């Protein structure tokens, strides 16, 4: 375990072991922090990601630095991060600090320029974000806001929204959700339990194919199994 400590030189194996331990440790730390920290970086998430990256990066590139201190510091920061999230849920003032409310940029087709300056966004960037939402004219926007996660939420005026079958009073089929039930020859046991079926049922649905030969198969809400890809032998 000498690779944990700072040394004059490290062998190639010790560098590899240090990388494996550092990588595994970061995986555990990210898991403890939850999906929020990796889905989109908000203020607190950005701070913790930047800090953790610097703490772990140094001992992974400098043999004179040990891993122990970095790991202790990382654990402390993870605990502080979780505590900050918990307190922000209990204390409104902290919640507004860590997760400020969305900033309204467009209301009823009119630009709120003071809020645009508050969000520190140039007009060109705003138009680029509108184009991503397939909106070419600001006057068509009923409401647009800059979210804390760094995304623009856009809602167009009712007159410019697509016509739906409900508007035309048309009969439609119920929503039918499709999920992968076989991936690369392995069946999804949790999904089978969810739909109340077993392996024998699934094998009967994909005959004459064998389970191991199916690359992708899906099942929908009506329990219809479809095979989308098989190995080349078939």
Image (cartoon, helix red, strand yellow):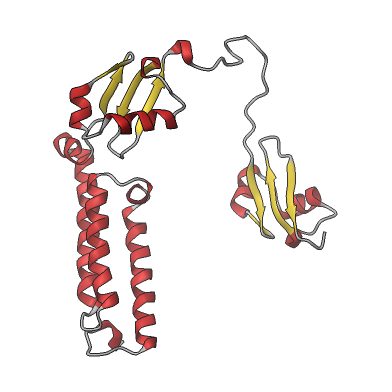
Quarter of the image with the C terminus is: bottom right
Residue drawn at point x = 33 percent, y = 13 percent? 108
On screen, residue 121 above or below 84: above
Quarter of the image for residue 5 reads bottom left
**Residue in the foreground of this view, choosing between 136 and 7:** 136
Q: Residue at x 33, y 24 (%)?
A: 144
Q: Is residue 51 above or below residue 60?
A: above
Q: Residue furthest right?
A: 208
- Residue 135 x %, y %: 43, 23
As drawn, which residue projects farthest toward the front? 124
Quadrant where the N terminus sits is bottom left
Tell me if residue 44 comes above or below residue 1 in the rendering: above
The structure residue drawn at horizontal position 22% and vertical position 80%, both measured from the top left corner, is 66
> In the image, what residue occupies the spot 67% across and 19% down?
172
Give left or right: position of 129 versus 122.
right
Task: List x then y, in percent, for residue 97.
Answer: 16, 39
Q: Is residue 91 above or below residue 198?
A: above
Q: Report how many numbered discs are placed on residues in the image.
A: 0
Image coordinates for residue 75, horizontal then vertical, percent: 24, 64
Residue 100 found in image quarter: top left
Residue 2 in percent (x, y) is at 28, 88
Q: Quadrant of residue 138?
A: top left
Work out which residue is located at the far left of the displayed protein and give it: 93
């Amino acid at each position: 375990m000498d690779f944990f400590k700072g040394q004059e030189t490290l062998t190639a194996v010790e560098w590899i072991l240090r990388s494996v331990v550092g990588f595994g440790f970061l995986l555990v730390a990210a898991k403890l922090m939850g999906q929020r920290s990796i889905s989109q970086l908000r203020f607190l998430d950005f701070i913790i990601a930047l800090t953790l990256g610097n703490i772990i990066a140094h001992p992974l590139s400098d043999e004179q630095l040990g891993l122990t201190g970095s790991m202790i510091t990382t654990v402390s920061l993870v605990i502080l991060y979780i505590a900050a999230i918990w307190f922000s849920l209990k204390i409104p003032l902290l919640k507004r600090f860590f997760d400020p409310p969305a900033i309204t940029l467009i209301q009823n087709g009119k630009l709120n320029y003071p809020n645009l300056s508050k969000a520190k966004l140039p007009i060109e960037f705003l138009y680029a974000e509108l184009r991503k939402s397939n909106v070419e004219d600001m006057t068509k926007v009923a409401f647009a806001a800059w979210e804390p996660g760094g995304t623009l939420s856009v809602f167009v005026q009712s007159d410019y929204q697509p016509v739906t079958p409900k508007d035309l009073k048309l009969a439609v089929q119920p929503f039918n959700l499709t999920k992968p039930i076989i991936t690369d020859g392995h069946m999804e046991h949790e999904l089978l339990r969810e739909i109340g079926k077993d392996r024998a049922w699934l094998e009967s649905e994909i005959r004459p194919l064998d389970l191991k030969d199916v690359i992708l198969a899906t099942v929908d809400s009506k329990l219809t199994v479809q095979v989308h890809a098989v190995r080349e032998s078939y």
